[in-house]
Image (cartoon, rainbow, N blue to C red):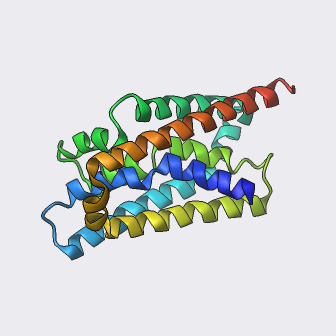
Amino acid sequence: MEDLIRQFVLLWAVIDPIGTLPVFLAVTAGGSVAHNRKIALVSVGVASLVLLFFIVAGEILLEAMSIPLSAFQIAGGVVLFVFALSMIFGDSKPEEELQMVNKGVDSAIFPLAIPSIASPGAMMAVVLLTDNHRFSLIDQFVTTGIVLLIMFITLMLLLVAPFIQKVIGTAGASVISRVMGLILAAVATNSVLAGIQTYFQL
């Protein structure tokens, strides 16, 4: 149960569904209910497919390039840490991605699906949490289930985004995103230490 909670918190932090809400509201402003629902379904669907691809093929790609998982674990931890620092000290996730929206890009895919939901940090995290050498097939199925659960929660949050926006506001989403960044920094540090321990067989 403790491992399940740890994985859920990690994946929730890197996916950050709450931080996606202001971005979703910006790209769907003025749209009909049906159109906004379609945007939510497409963005979550694409993000889910991207993360599932990394769960299935991420480690295979590493092994094909002869990169030991411990090295990827250290690199992933460093990337996650930098990502966490950007969430804490830089523009918060909602603020940064709202700027992307204003550039007129295809909003359902970018920045909603990538990088708001399926962020680089999330891609790294799912590969690390489905390591064939550290986790059994059952464990990997459980991790996949957690990812899909968070995707489902994300979809539900997007569908009720207008109501949530009235409750917490953009500032509230920014605060929550920064707290998630702090949690992610601690998880990233632990990933680096674990990778060093594995590589040097300490």
The residue that appears at 48% across and 63% down in the rendered structure is 151
- Residue 137 vertical position relative to residue 16 in the rendered view, above or below: below
The percent position of residue 108, horizontal first and vertical second, equals 29, 58
Q: Residue furthest right?
A: 202
The residue that appears at 49% across and 54% down in the rendered structure is 50
Query: Horizontally, is 141 left or right of 200 in the view?
Result: left
Asked if residue 80 shows in the view, the reply is yes
Dividing the image into 4 quarters, which one contains the C terminus? top right
Count how many numbered circles sit on residues in the image: 0
The residue that appears at 47% across and 33% down in the rendered structure is 83
Q: Residue furthest bottom?
A: 34
* Front residue (pair 200, 106): 200
The percent position of residue 126, horizontal first and vertical second, equals 60, 49
* Front residue (pair 2, 196): 2
- Residue 16 vertical position relative to residue 167 in the rendered view, above or below: above
The percent position of residue 181, horizontal first and vertical second, equals 48, 38
* Front residue (pair 192, 110): 192
Dividing the image into 4 quarters, which one contains the N terminus? bottom right
Q: Residue furthest top?
A: 200
Residue 140 is drawn in which quadrant?
A: bottom right
Asked if residue 68 shows in the view, the reply is no
Query: Horizontally, is 119 left or right of 130 in the view?
Result: left
The percent position of residue 137, horizontal first and vertical second, equals 77, 60
Q: Residue furthest front?
A: 167
